[in-house]
Amino acid sequence: MAPKTVTVPEYQETDQVTLDPKTTALVIVDMQNDFVKEGGRLVVPAAAATVPAIARLLKRAREHQVTVAYTQDSHLPGDPEFPIWGEHCLVGTWGWEIVEELKPEPGDFIFPKRRYDGFYGTNMEHDLRVKGVQNLIVTGTVANICVLHTAGSAALRWFHIIVPKDGVSALNDFDMESALRQIHFLYRGIITTCDGIQFA
Ligand code: ZN
């Protein structure tokens, strides 16, 4: 098949976004050893480089009492995802654990999930609504898989979504750009950077 060249349609990037900490949640998607760390089962090479930016945002979010929620890919032996991706994020293993640098603290939400969408089969919608959350900052990996499905699922529920591009990672540029374009164009998400997000 002849190689195809495509041009990514324009999408808007926003330098600075100010969010009300009371109605905002920071969602960290699948930043687990299997995806992020050397020796993981399904490493996204670009994911490790996003850890410092996410960690800075997480620190500021905590300072402003922003709701912090993690999704944690969680599979049981024989999961039907394994023929597609190989075995990964087996519950109880090192690879399943969230990376040390972004470790959850007491009071954070952790939503174990079986599929790409952080809302599917979890209490995420209920728990965020009870907290009065309206804005979701979505970070983590993989940009066009669990980040996109979670951001899309949030947008379908009329949460406002904000995606800092230096806080998400993909396996290649096409996947990254198509995910960001989709988030902006279809889900009307704000594309910004981790340090561009302010709480006030
Ligand atoms: Zn999985």
Image (cartoon, rainbow, N blue to C red):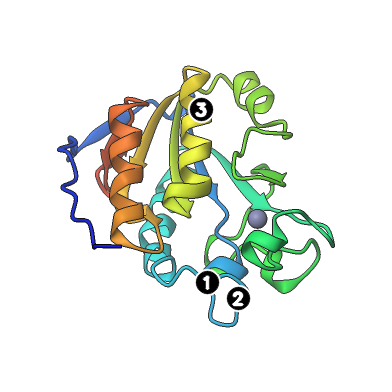
Label 2 and label 3: CA atoms lie apart by: 28 Å
- Along the viewing direction, whichever of 32 and 78 lies nearer the viewer: 78
Q: Residues within 10 Å of mark 1 (few under 14, many from 20)?
A: some
Q: SS of the residue at dot 2?
A: loop
Mark closest to the chain's N terminus, 2 or 3: 2
The residue drawn where x is 47% and y is 17% is: 158
The residue drawn where x is 60% and y is 47% is: 70
Q: Label 1 amino acid?
A: Val
Query: Which residue was labeled with disc 3?
Result: 154
Mark closest to the chain's N terminus, 1 or 3: 1
Q: Residues within 10 Å of mark 3 (few under 14, many from 20)?
A: many
Q: Quadrant of the C terminus?
A: top left
Query: Which residue was labeled with disc 2?
Result: 40
- Along the viewing direction, whichever of 182 and 70 lies nearer the viewer: 182
Whether pointer 1 and pointer 3 mark residues with C-beta atoms closer than 8 Å, the reply is: no
- Counting from the top left corner in percent of width and height, residue 134 is at 47, 21
Label 1 and label 3: CA atoms lie apart by: 25 Å
| The label number, if any, that marks residue 43 in the structure image | 1
- Along the viewing direction, whichever of 9 and 162 lies nearer the viewer: 9
User: For residue 125, what is the image quadrant?
Assistant: top right
Whether pointer 1 and pointer 2 mark residues with C-beta atoms closer than 8 Å, the reply is: yes
- Counting from the top left corner in percent of width and height, residue 116 is at 60, 45
- Counting from the top left corner in percent of width and height, residue 87 is at 71, 68
Q: Quadrant of the N terminus?
A: bottom left
Q: Is residue 183 above or below residue 2?
A: above
Q: Label 3 amino acid?
A: Ala
State the residue lying farthest toward the bottom: 39
Label 1 and label 2: CA atoms lie apart by: 6 Å
Q: SS of the residue at dot 1?
A: loop
